[in-house]
Image: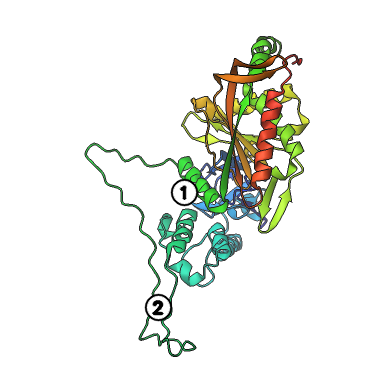
Amino acid sequence: MSEFQLVMPKMGESIAEATIIRWTKNEGDQIAVDETVLEIATDKVDSEVPSPKAGVLVKKLFKDGDVVAVNAPIAIIALAGSATTTAPVAAPVSAPMPVVETAAVVEASIQTIKETVSSAGGNRFYSPLVLNIAKTENISMAELETIPGTGAEGRVTKRDILEHVQNRGNAQPLTVAAPVAQPQTVAAPVAQPQTVAAPAPKPAVSLGGGDEIIEMDRMRKLIADHMVMSKHTSPHVTSFVEADVTNMVLWRDKAKKVYEKREGEKITFTPMFIECVVKAIKDYPMINVSIDGYNIIKKKSINVGMAAALPSGNLIVPVIKNADMMNLVGLTKTVNDLANRARANKLSPDDIQGGTFTVTNVGGFGNVMGTPIINQPQVAILATGSIKKKPAVLETPMGDVIAIRHMMFLSLSYDHRVVDGSLGGSFLRRIADYMEQWDVNREI
């Protein structure tokens, strides 16, 4: 019998697992080439998983709601034309071998997966992501067994192990009592037992009359985990500058009607901001990096993520690939396309992966500035504030004057492991310079 193992697809370089939302096929169902077998979700996007081969769904290796590591087998499909799919419905009683063979293969596949994603010696289930975090944080299997799990069937989730790591740092160090007269000796354990401080309890939440408990939706839970992970991973530093974007405002006011009439769509400030960011990244390429242990990975491509608000209130970050290869028209069309498909929940997994730098517009909510959280595995993120008219001092050949100008705050959060204040501050100032030097007479 010829079989094919359908695996959990990789949804992005920073995504190690995905949640099964629901199966669209049941065991025994026929599957055509490229037909959807199940729907999955990450903290970035929902997606369908098609089968690259035709056949019959023999076994579902996970159920709805399970969290599965990328590249792990999730289903077994008997290929079209194999003994299982071509055998008549009423098989002879004397020849049950195909059924027995299928069962043996299925059980062997399930056992392989269990060995891959479970602990080496314990009885609890641990996902590859949890085991990887445990290895990185030097958490032994014995210690891992003591962590309370909030996942299905008591599983330890990413949130559980990260909270354990944080609480670990709050534990009091072990002290050993030693007699003053004999400093080289150690007190017997019976006389001075060593104790480890218990993990700090979660803050108690009090409920009053009329309070409403709202459970986070799936995407909000994943976003929450991703944000905690980012703050735990990167020491965040934020720098600010105020930019005079009067030239950008005047140019857009003049060009937007011409562009809309010619291209059939609007031009916003977002592609203009991204053009300035890309120029600054070319000047300071060490902003366009990721960290792998003690190695710095310098990215060749400049792929700019743009945070977009969804109707649900959640955020998603579609990515403009090779933004440095586009002119302003190309950036505008790509920004509009990604924003429209994000609002319609029609982004593909490829649309949200591969980002090397992120821009978020907090000014869209009327905020003058913000301190954004880095989108891992990137090392910096820019927030653009709202544009406000303000009196400002201008230097002219005739002397200083006060004029009404369009001003905007820029905020850059960066990973202090690899981006020092000099690099972060200089990069941010260069973005502001490109904005202030915008050619008010340029052609669109």
* Circle 1: residue type: Gly
- SS state under label 2: loop
12 or 173, nearer to the observer? 173
Instruction: Locate the C terminus and report the quarter of the image it occupies.
Output: top right
Amino acid type of the residue tagged 2 in the rendering: Gln
- On the image, the x and y values in percent for residue 255 come to 68, 12
How far separated are the C-alphas under marks 1 and 2? 41 Å
Quadrant placement of the N terminus: bottom right
**Residue 40 percent coordinates (x, y):** 54, 43
Residue at left offset 72%, top offset 51%:
297
Please indicate whether residue 312 sits to the left or right of residue 97 in the image: left
**In the image, residue 220 above or below residue 403:** below
For the point 71% across and 35% down, the residue is: 321
Q: Residues within 10 Å of mark 1 (few under 14, many from 20)?
A: some
Q: Establish if 128 lies above or below 428.
A: below
Residue 344 visible in the shown view: no
Marks 1, 2: nearer the viewer: 2
Q: Nearer the viewer, residue 38 or 205?
A: 205
Toward the left, the furthest residue is 209
Residue 254 marker: none
Classify mark 2: residues with Cα within 10 Å, few (<14), some (14-19) or many (20+): few
Where residue 154 appears, as percent x and y from the top left, is: 41, 59
Kindly identify which residue carries mark 1.
65
Q: Are marks 1 and 2 in contact (CB under 8 Å)?
A: no
- Label ID, residue 194: 2
Residue placed most toward the observer, 363 or 110: 363
- Residue 258 in picture, x, y percent from top left: 69, 9
